[in-house]
Image: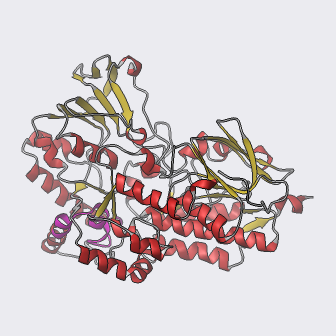
């Protein structure tokens, strides 16, 4: 960390404070420090860069976005230097890439690692943000940018007797680096995206694996095939066209989304298309690359769901197990994929516990007891129970805006947020992947938001503005739009973390803009091009 740069904001320690050293935080430091010459300070509780990929080191951790688009697009030099061998990147490969970015732009010198931000208070008199850390330090800045991550506030259920368990307990989002699962009796609680990956990776090495399943999942193959040097060279040569397509698409995963409805296709055609997608692999491809209406038409959704259900009965040898593994709800959650997931349950060393039918009653010193009295003896318990998604980190920090209003109070009935980046009564405050932002492959959305934030700050500095915040009317209109769009899909009908259903006591609310990255870029671009008419500038001065 250095303080040698000149701060342009009078009376402030820094021009901007950035929380987080993941994709969003690193790019923010680059944009504001290197391109605009601002004096910035970054904080991260981790020991180094990486964000979610620093913490999620569990076995089998892999991105399900294709390697050539799970990266920044802004640097042609970095794109050409990119290294990958398979269709998808593993956690170590992603972390290596992020370290390479940090090295290339010397980003670490603007960070203080191993430091957790505990409070962010806006000072109405000074017009500055006061940021306090767990080290007891407080710094001030004109702008506050949070790259806290969508999926980083761990959701760990508090079961009865959990402290009595003599074995090891870990959450996938805070993995113990010295963890060793080989030859152990392992229990995995949760079967979402992370749970699927952990289960697949753990089954071959554990003495015995017990999967505690609350909800059966639709899981298609991942298809993580080797990529030839010729294919990679072709991808690198076509990056201009690739990024143009990604940034104008819906889910931004690098494939052309289907424009053909399943609803009007014959059963023969549907199954042929689904089978080809099954052989190709990819969760988002199966949902959005096969037909255009799986997320919006019940008929199309049923066709996709029934195809996967048939696969389960064909793969799983025990018909009772197959029935337990067969989802009963609609196919409208974050699409999952994994290598031979259902085959895992054909192994002699794997047990499936249906905790919806027979819930977990308590932890015991030697394992987990279900309500029926059945006890599973375990050496290690892995919580793959996900995160308090989207807004969790914001409500866990003591965040206070104008006149001391707290984020917890503002979002007590569910997260709000304007454009997924701002909130009323929080001047000069910008969220990366905040509530009601796009539901897509994340790096392109992160870049989109950071660039908009940087352009807005550049405008503020050029015009000598003291503060910017959205109007309440604009915020409410945006939240309403997100709800309207979500209601046009089937997603709200399924219990999913996308709407907060995995966190006890959390209200089921819309937290994403689900009309795609291309439409999102147009919407936020219109705000900027329209002269920020949805914003209030220099509000404190206007009230004098």
Q: Is residue 413 visible?
A: no
Front position in the image: 282 or 22: 22
Residue 489 versus residue 530 in the image, above or below: above
Q: Name which residue lies at 24% across and 19% down.
A: 373
Q: Name which residue lies at 66% across and 47% down.
A: 410
Front position in the image: 93 or 128: 93
Tell me where the magenta segment starts and ends, as one range.
276-296
Q: Is residue 229 magenta?
A: no
Kindly give the residue lying farthest to the right in the view shown: 544
Image x and y of residue 529, in percent: 66, 80
Front position in the image: 186 or 162: 186
Tell me, what colour scheme is on the image?
Answer: secondary structure
Screen quadrant of the C terminus: bottom right
Image x and y of residue 497, in percent: 42, 48
Is 307 on the left-hand or right-hand side of 193?
A: left
Residue 186 versus residue 409 in the image, above or below: above
Q: Is residue 15 visible?
A: yes
Q: Is residue 289 magenta?
A: yes
Kindly give the residue lying farthest to the left in the view shown: 317
The quadrant holding residue 526 is bottom right
Image x and y of residue 314, in percent: 8, 53
Q: Name which residue lies at 56% across and 51% down.
A: 20
The quadrant holding residue 382 is top left
Residue 87 versus residue 44 in the image, above or below: below
Q: How many marks?
A: 0
Q: Name which residue lies at 43% across and 34% down.
A: 156
Image x and y of residue 61, in percent: 32, 49
């Amino acid at each position: 960390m250095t303080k040698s740069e000149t701060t342009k904001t009078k009376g402030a320690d820094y021009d901007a404070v950035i929380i987080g050293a993941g994709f969003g935080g690193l790019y923010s430091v680059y944009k504001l420090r290197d391109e605009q010459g601002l004096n910035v300070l970054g904080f991260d509780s981790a020991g180094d860069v990486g964000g979610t990929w620093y913490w999620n080191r569990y076995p089998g951790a892999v991105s399900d976005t294709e390697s050539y688009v799970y990266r920044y697009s802004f640097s042609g030099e970095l794109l050409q230097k990119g290294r990958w061998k398979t269709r998808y990147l593993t956690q170590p490969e992603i972390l290596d890439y992020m370290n390479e970015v940090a090295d290339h732009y010397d980003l670490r010198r603007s960070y203080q690692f191993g430091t957790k931000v505990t409070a962010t208070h806006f000072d109405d008199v000074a017009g500055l943000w006061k940021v306090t850390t767990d080290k007891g330090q407080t710094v001030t800045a004109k702008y506050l940018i949070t790259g806290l991550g969508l999926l980083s506030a761990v959701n760990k259920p508090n079961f009865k007797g959990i402290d009595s368990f003599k074995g090891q307990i870990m959450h996938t989002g805070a993995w113990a680096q010295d963890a060793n699962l080989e030859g152990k009796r392992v229990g995995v609680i949760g079967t979402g995206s992370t749970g699927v990956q952990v289960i697949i990776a753990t089954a071959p090495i554990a003495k015995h694996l017990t999967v505690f399943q609350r909800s059966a999942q639709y899981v298609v193959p991942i298809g993580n095939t080797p990529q030839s040097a010729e294919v990679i060279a072709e991808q690198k040569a076509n990056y201009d066209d690739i990024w143009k397509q990604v940034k104008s698409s819906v889910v931004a995963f690098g494939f052309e989304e289907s424009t053909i409805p399943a609803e009007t296709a014959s059963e023969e055609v549907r199954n042929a298309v689904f089978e080809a997608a099954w052989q190709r692999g990819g969760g988002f491809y199966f949902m959005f690359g096969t037909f255009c209406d799986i997320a919006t038409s019940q008929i199309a959704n049923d066709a996709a769901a029934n195809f996967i259900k048939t696969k389960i009965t064909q793969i799983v040898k025990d018909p009772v197990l197959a029935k337990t593994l067969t989802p009963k709800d609609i196919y409208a959650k974050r699409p999952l994929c994994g290598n031979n997931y259902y085959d895992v349950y054909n192994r002699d060393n794997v047990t499936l516990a249906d905790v919806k039918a027979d819930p977990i009653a308590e932890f015991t010193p030697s394992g987990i007891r279900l309500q029926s009295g059945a006890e599973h003896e375990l050496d290690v318990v892995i919580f793959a129970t996900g995160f308090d998604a989207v807004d969790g980190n914001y409500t866990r920090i003591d965040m206070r805006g104008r006149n001391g209003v707290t984020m917890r109070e503002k979002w007590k009935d569910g997260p709000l947020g304007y454009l997924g980046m701002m909130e009323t009564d929080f001047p000069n405050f910008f969220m990366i992947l905040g509530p009601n932002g796009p539901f897509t492959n994340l790096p392109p959305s992160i870049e989109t938001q950071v660039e908009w934030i940087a352009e807005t700050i550049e405008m503020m500095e050029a015009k000598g503005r003291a503060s910017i915040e959205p109007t309440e009317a604009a915020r409410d209109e945006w939240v309403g739009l997100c709800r309207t769009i979500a209601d046009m899909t089937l997603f709200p009908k399924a219990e999913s973390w996308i709407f907060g259903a995995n966190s006890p006591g959390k209200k089921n609310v819309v937290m994403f803009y689900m009309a795609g990255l291309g439409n999102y870029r147009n919407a936020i671009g219109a705000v900027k091009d329209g002269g920020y008419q949805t914003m209030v500038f220099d509000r404190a001065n206007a009230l004098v």
